[in-house]
Amino acid sequence: MADETSESCTLSREDAAARLEAIASELRGGEETIAVDVDNKSISLTPADSVDYEVAVAEHSAMLRSKRESIRIDLQWAVED
């Protein structure tokens, strides 16, 4: 069974960068567990020393609406027991 916690909001570029930097700082910290803030929760994760990294960039053109762009970043790892 998978538990998923998600958040969707509009942020300034500075605030979005701060959230990404907080995750990067936790990963760099070298601790066995890291804390990731999602909405009003702090989720504890136990990343492996090696993680699978995927980044996808999409550019969407629309005739009737403004052009949109997106970046999706995915980090995955196996949790060691």
Image: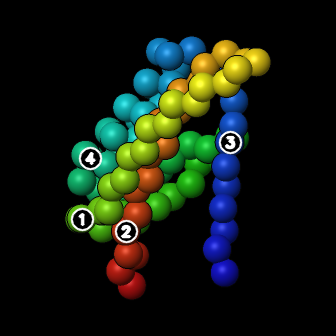
Residue type for callout 1: Ser
Q: Earlier in the sequence, mark 2 or mark 4?
A: 4
Whether residue 32 is visible to the viewer of this picture, yes or no, is no
Q: Where is residue 48 in the image (x, y as percent from the top left)?
A: 30, 68
The Cα atoms of the two marked residues, 2 and 4, are separated by: 17 Å
Disc sitting over residue 50 in the figure: 1
* Secondary-structure class at tag 3: loop
Q: Do the residues labelled 1 and 2 touch (CB within 8 Å)?
A: yes
- The structure residue drawn at horizontal position 32% and vertical position 39%, both measured from the top left corner, is 25
The residue that mark 3 highlights is: 7
- The structure residue drawn at horizontal position 49% and vertical position 36%, both measured from the top left corner, is 58
* Camera-nearest residue between 58 and 62: 62
> If the image is split into quadrants, where does the C terminus sit?
bottom left
Residue type for callout 3: Glu
Q: Do the residues labelled 3 and 1 touch (CB within 8 Å)?
A: no
The Cα atoms of the two marked residues, 1 and 2, are separated by: 7 Å
The Cα atoms of the two marked residues, 2 and 3, are separated by: 21 Å
Task: Tell me: residue 16, above or below residue 26.
Answer: above
Task: Tell me: residue 64, above or below residue 30.
Answer: above
Q: Where is residue 15 in the image (x, y as percent from the top left)?
A: 52, 20
Badge 4: residue crowd in 10 Å (few <14, some 14–19, many ≥20): few
In the figure, is residue 38 to the left or right of 78? Answer: right
The Cα atoms of the two marked residues, 4 and 1, are separated by: 14 Å
Disc sitting over residue 77 in the figure: 2
Q: Nearer the viewer, mark 4 or mark 1?
A: 1
